[in-house]
Amino acid sequence: MTPIHPTAARFRALVERGDLDALEDLFTPDVRLYSPVKFTPFEGRPMVLALFGVLLRTFDDFRYVGAYAGEARTSVDGTEAESNVLLFRTTVHGKDIHGIDLLHFDEEGRIKEFTVMVRPQSAVQTLGQAVQEGLVAAGLVPAPAPAPQ
């Protein structure tokens, strides 16, 4: 069994503790986070850290339940990168969510690409709504325009 990357182990521990401030050093400045609730990635360390702040406030009973280590091609440039998958379980607004975090590391061991996948579809919809509300409340995105009447 291949051990998980030290950065993934540290990331896991910090997220489980809710230690948002300590996450900053784990990401490259130009990190990209691919989310199941948004087509384009969240880009850059400040935005990704702000998103984690929203997520940590949104999730109930978040916990990692497993890990896999290996290599995978990145989305940005298609290069092979050391990668880890962290399996998680959580609840959002009463919906159980099963998911994975796919982390790709740069040569210095920092997270350069992060992909989140969740199931089931109803959980994705609930998560998307909760994250959008959190991003608006944090002033990170504008509130959606009201629907025409």
Image (cartoon, rainbow, N blue to C red):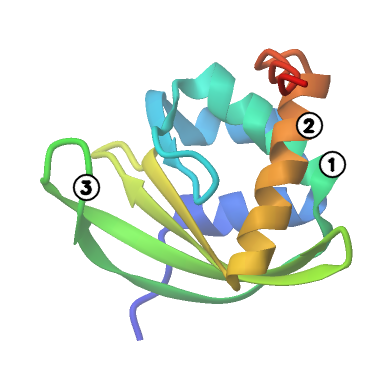
Residue 20 visible in this rendered orientation of the protein: no
Secondary element under disc 1, as helix, strand or loop, is: helix
Q: CA distance from mark 1 to mark 3?
A: 29 Å
Q: Decide which of tag 2 and tag 1 comes sooner along the chain.
A: 1
In x, y percent, where is residue 142?
68, 13
Secondary element under disc 3, as helix, strand or loop, is: loop
In x, y percent, where is residue 148?
72, 19
Residue at 48% over, 50% down: 7
Q: Which mark is residue 74?
A: 3
User: Which quadrant holds residue 123?
Assistant: bottom right
Q: Amino acid at mark 1?
A: Arg
Locate the N terminus by quadrant: bottom left
Secondary element under disc 2, as helix, strand or loop, is: helix
Please give the residue where the numbered disc 1 appears in the rendered image. Answer: 57
Q: Is residue 118 above or below residue 135?
A: below
| Nearest the eye: 134 or 110 | 134
Q: Decide which of tag 1 and tag 3 comes sooner along the chain.
A: 1
Q: Amino acid at mark 2?
A: Gly
Q: Is residue 136 above or below residue 61?
A: above
Contact between labelled residues 1 and 2, with CB atoms less than 8 Å apart: yes
Nearer to us: label 2 or label 3: 2
Q: Amino acid at mark 3?
A: Thr
